[in-house]
Amino acid sequence: MKIVLLFALAFWASTSALLSREYKFSVSLNDDDTYRLHWTIDNSKGTINVGIETKTTGWIGFGLSPDGKMPNSDIVTGWVKDEKGFLQDRHSLGRFLPPLDSKQNVELIAASEDDTTTVLEFTRSLRACERNDTDVPSGTARVIWAYHPADPESIDGLMQHAKSGSKSVNLLTGFGSVRAFPSGTPSFQLTTTVPSSDTTYWCKPFRLPVLSEGGYLIGEIVHHMVVYRCDSAAEYVNQEGPCHTLNGNGVNFPDDVGIPFSGNGSVQYALLEMHYNNVEGRSDHVDSFGLEFFYRTTPPKHNATILEIGQDYEAMGFFLPPGLTRATVTSYCSQECTKVGVPSEGSKVFATLLHSHLAGVAIRVKQFRNETFLGYVARNEYYDFNFQDFTFPLTNVTIRPGDALQTECDYSTVGRTGLTRGGLTTSSEMCLAYMIVYPSTNAQSCLSQSSRDAISRLAKEADAQGWGTYYGDGTSSLRQSISSFNFSKPGADVAYLDYLHWQQKVECKSVGGERLIDDAVANVSTASVEPPTVQPECTNSLDQPPTFVQLPPTTTTATVAGTSAAGSLVCATASSILLVVFALAV
C-alpha cells in the first residue's frame, strides 16, 4: 500500500526597496545571495515580468539555457549608468560575447542602482518571438546568470563576467502556495541523528500523535525527507537504518484538502526517510531541521491522494542500451484502470512530480479521453535530476473515469558502456510521475511494462541478426538473453527503438495494494497522436534594431528577502507513503 502526501518548501514572494513592483516568486541564484531573481507570470498577456537584483554596480546578465551552459542560450544584459538604464536582447553562440539579436524582444520597465546593488526589471513573451529566442519552458528552466563590477564603455564593450553560474528553476508554474499558520495551530516534529557514513539514505520510524477523532495534515516546515505511512509498525519504532531517497521541493495542499492520520482505522505510524551527505564522516551531528507537521482535527472537504503512473522500474523489460543519443520510453495507464480507480466526478490534479535518474533528459505526461489528446498534465523538456520539483497545471486538469494517461521519458546514455536497467540507484533508471489529486482515487498506482511476448520477440530478433542470443522464454532465460545483447552490432539500435513501441502490460493497484483489474494490454504505437500546438502571437516583439533602452533610475536602498531550499523520495520498508518532501542535506 502506498499513499503519498506532499507539502511545501517556502520560496517567498518578495519585494525590495529598489524594486518598482511586487513579484509573486523570488529565489537566490547563487549561494551567497548576491544575485536574486524575482518574477511573475501574466498568463492573460502571455508574458513574464522579471526583476533582477544583483550586488554589483556594473553590468548584469540573465539567460535561459538548454543545459545550464552558455552556448545556445537566450540572454539579456543590462546596467545602469549616468542615471539611465540599459537592456539588450542577445543570444549566445559559444563561450564568447553573445551577439545582439536583430529584434529586441525584451522591454525594460524599470532600472535602479544604489552604492551596492543594481536592479533591472523587464518583461518578455513566454514564447520565443524569433529563432534566437527561447520559450519559457513549462517544467525546469535552466537559468544562467553573470555579472561584472563595472559598466561597459560602449554597446560592444561588454567585458567578460567576473562571476557566473546556473540554477534550475520552475519559472512558468513557480512554487506551491505558502501558508502562514496562525499561532496555536497544532503540530508535531520528527528529527533524527545524522549517520557517520559519507552518503546515506536513512529511515527512522515514529509513532504519530494519538488523536481520538483523528487528524488531517495540512502543511509543514521542511528540510529534506520522505515520510511513509505504516498502519501497524510498533515493533519498528525504536529502529532506524539505511534506505533510498531522491531530491526536490514540496508543496502545500489547497485549502480544505488534507490527508487523514491517527484515529480509528487510519495511519498510526510514520517512517521518516532522509538523504544525507556527511562529507566529514562525523557521528555527532543531530539533524535539527527535521519536519514540523501542522494539522487540523476537523475533517477537510476533500481527502487527497497521489496517483503514481509510469514504468515499472523493476520489470526486466525496462532497460537502456549504451550510447543512445536520445530515446523515448512510453508508459501507459489504461482507461480500464481509471474506470474503476477514479471517482465518478473525477479527480483534480493540483501538483505533479516527474522523476527519472541521471540518464533522463525530458519527461511528459499526456491525457487522452475517447482517444483524443486533451493536453499535457505535466511537461519538462529540460529535466534536471538535481532539481526535482513540483509543477502546477496552468489550467484545470481533471482525470475522469475512462481517461488514459501516457508518461514519456527521454533518455541519453552517451558515455555509458553497459546496459542501464531499472532500479533504485542513481546509475539505474526510473520513469515515474506522481500526481497529487483530490478527491482521493481508489487507484494508487498504474504502471506498465513491456510484455513477455515483446521481450521474447526482441531476443529472437537479436539471435537471428547476430547481436544477441535467445535462451528461451523463461524469466531467467529472458534476463540472460537481454544481458547478451551487443548494441554495437549493426541493426541492434534500430531493433531496440522499434521494441519501445511494442505491446505493454498495464498493472492497476488500489491504495491497499489490491489489483483493480486484470492486466490490460496497451500498444503504445497505436495511441492517439496529439494535434499540433497553435502558438499565440508574440506579445512584445519590438521589431527594431538593437539600441540602448533607457529609463530614469530610482536611487534608494535595496533590501533582499526570500529563502531557497532543496529535497528527497522512495523507501521500501513501509506499507505506504504518507508524505514526500524533497531535499538534499549537506
Image (cartoon, rainbow, N blue to C red):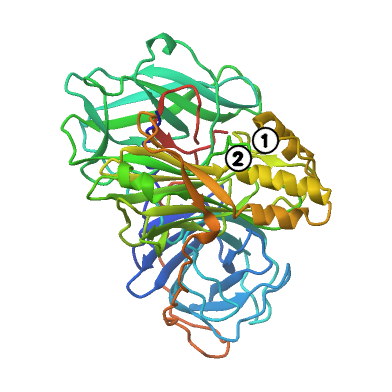
In-image side of 492 versus 206 (left or right): right
In-image side of 301 versus 259 (left or right): left
In-image side of 557 versus 545 (left or right): left
Q: How many marks?
A: 2
Q: Are marks 2 and 1 in contact (CB under 8 Å)?
A: yes
Q: Position of residue 471 (x, y in %)?
A: 75, 35
> What residue is disc 1 on?
473
Q: Residues within 10 Å of mark 1 (few under 14, many from 20)?
A: some
Q: Amino acid at mark 1?
A: Asp
Vertical order, 245 against 345 (above or below) = above
Q: Residues within 10 Å of mark 2 (few under 14, many from 20)?
A: some
Return the residue found at the far bottom. Answer: 544
Q: Position of residue 161 (x, y in %)?
A: 67, 64
Residue 51: which quarter of the image? bottom left
Write the residue at 40% across / 33% down.
515
The residue tagged with tag 2: helix, strand or loop? Answer: helix
Vertical order, 569 against 329 (above or below) = above
Q: Amino acid at mark 2?
A: Arg
> What residue is disc 2 on?
452
Write the residue at 63% across / 81% down.
100
Q: Position of residue 247 (x, y in %)?
A: 53, 40
Q: Position of residue 50 (x, y in %)?
A: 44, 67
Name the image quarter holding the N terminus: top left
Residue 132: which quarter of the image? bottom right
The foreground one among 491 and 95 is: 491
Vertical order, 307 against 40 (above or below) = above
Tell me if I can see residue 163 in this picture: yes
